[in-house]
Amino acid sequence: MEVSATFLLSVLILALLWFFSGKNTQKYRLPPGPSPLPLIGNLLQMKKTAPFKSFLEFSKTYGSVMTVYLGWQRVVVLVGYEAVKEALVEQADDFTGRAPVPFLHKATRGYGIGISNGDRWRQLRRFTLSTLRDFGMGRKGMEEWIQEESKHMRARIRTYRGESFDPTILLSRTVSNVVCCLVFGQRFSYEDKQFVNLLAVITKIVRFNSSPKGVMYNIFPWLMERLPGKQHAVFAKVEEIRDFVKTKIQEHRDTLDPSSPRDFIDCFLIRGQEEKENPSTEFHHDNLVATVMNLFLAGTETTSSTIRHALSVLIKHRNIQDKMQEEIDSVIGRERCPNMEDRKSLPFSDAVIHEIQRFLDIVPFSVPHYALQDVSFRGYTIPKDTVVVPLLHSVLKEEKQWATPHSFNPQHFLDQNGNFKKNPAFLPFSAGKRACVGESLARMELFIFIVTLLQDFTFTCPEGPDSINLIPEYSSFANLPRSHKIIATPR
């Protein structure tokens, strides 16, 4: 009875907060939007399996800048390339805030580069970008790491001897090892049980975040914390990753040579020692743990899922796979590893890889932004503490920007002469000051790994190409492609 009374009192307080916050925002000229219900906002009008599609429907009535309510959280949604570019690029300083997404906030305890704001974010982002570049991100050194990892990947695929297999875990190991080289200074054996277990944990976390329960947690965290359910098991899994990261950090402390940093963790620890007398330093243990978790998780799942989706697309569209292989054979051959210089001579392959990213649309909402103060935008006021969603789905699938937005079409990135053609609306990594810090690394991985795979293998599936379903298994925070068993036939 006491719990029920507390719960009802909480609901009453929240209803009152909703009422008075609504009164308070009448002084603002908010963007238009559908009328919300108390407490639940516009949730009943949202598609559970693909909520971002509901935003597109709303925009037909309310325009490219609109207000919706997820629960009692006010959200301003930016729809289409022009609105997203204007906010994130032309008014970049107004939209640098990152929303305190409840799941991410609890997972990182509010620390790290992912959802931090203000001076903490500025310091950590500047340090992270410069350190990753020093260790070769986007440069020759990183290219060699990726090429080396591609050899391990190909060797493992050959062990299947033309038998069908699920590439999910293999691709996660391959991509994650590149991040591990940067962050931990080591790669892990594909048989390493702890490594394999952590990758399975990452997959579970990302799937939960894109499931209806994950969405509910981010909208009603106070309620989901008090209800039984999968969310509690998922946070226990997050702690497994935290413990692994903390162990690696301690190993680095014990063997640190300040004159010879080996990786990201060493560089962070050295910076922390340099600023140990600064009481307001951001280079402390909590930020290191959270930032390493950010890099480890984000650098593993998105890129490996994109490559997995690429294989499904190439099986489904065998003519495209054949054409890529012809181009690769004529430019690189089958003996040497591809490098980033080859991209200029492989316009069709480059176009296909870009189209794979556009078509998958892996983070349709982007990671939500946040108004850190009142923001004026297109004649409206976005009040402080409003979540801002730059709907990347609406950019990557906008009819004004793409000839056939809902079909897989590499011609989107080719001119009439077959040369590669950029499109400014290609924003899978978002844009502006909060664009993905690992963009150059991901681009390099996608190109080298996909080209390497097609050099050595032809991909099919046991049930034939018609059995491949390109509709994502989960469509919410992330569009997660379905798993298919595939056959890699050596060429």
Image: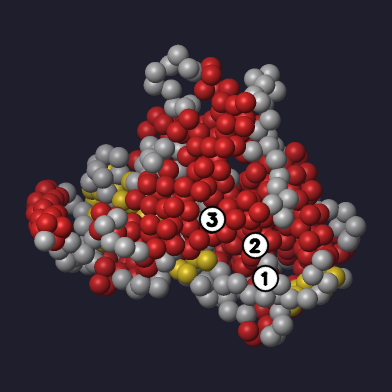
Q: Is residue 304 visible?
A: yes
Q: Please state which of residues 244 and 362 is positioned toward the viewer in this rendering.
A: 244
**Image spot of residue 468 (x, y percent):** 62, 80
* Element marked by disc 3: helix
Q: CA distance from mark 1 to mark 3?
A: 17 Å
> Residue at point 73% right, 50% down?
189
Q: CA distance from mark 1 to mark 2?
A: 8 Å
Q: Which residue is mark 2?
A: 169
Q: Please state which of residues 384 and 113 is positioned toward the viewer in this rendering.
A: 113
* Labelled pair 2, 3 in contact (Cβ < 8 Å): no
Q: Is residue 219 visible?
A: no
* Element marked by disc 2: helix
Q: CA distance from mark 2 to mark 3?
A: 11 Å
Question: Is residue 411 found left or right of 491 in the rendered image?
Answer: left
Q: Which residue is mark 1?
A: 166
Question: Is residue 168 found left or right of 361 in the rendered image?
Answer: right
Residue 202 - label? 3
